[in-house]
Image: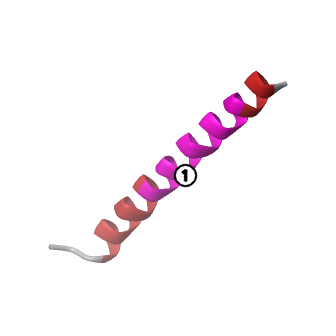
Amino acid sequence: MSCLLCLIMYLAMNNVSSIDNWKEQENLKFRPS
């Protein structure tokens, strides 16, 4: 079960980083340089 928990935490961290990347892309869209 601990391995399953580690897998869930690993996927959760990947999702967080993906959301951060998406927010950065949205900010670039709304802020033309």
Residue 19 part of the magenta-drawn span: yes
Left or right of 18 in this view: 24: left
Residue in the picture at 78% in, 27% down? 2
Give the residue furthest to the right.
1
Looking at the rendering, in which quadrant would you find the C terminus? bottom left
Which x, y percent locates residue 3? 74, 22
Residue 10 part of the magenta-drawn span: yes
- Tell me the SS state at disc 1: helix
Left or right of 4 in this view: 30: left
Left or right of 1 in this view: 6: left
The one of 5 and 26 positioned closer to us in this rendering: 5
**9 vs 31: above or below:** above
What span is colored magenta in the figure? 6-20
Left or right of 3 in this view: 16: left
Residue in the picture at 49% in, 48% down? 18
Which x, y percent locates residue 4? 78, 26
Corner quadrant of residue 12: top right
> In the image, what residue type sits under mark 1?
Val
Main SS class of the magenta portion in the image: helix
Residue in the picture at 56% in, 44% down? 13
Q: Which residue is mark 1?
A: 16
Give the residue furthest to the bottom.
31
**23 vs 32: above or below:** above
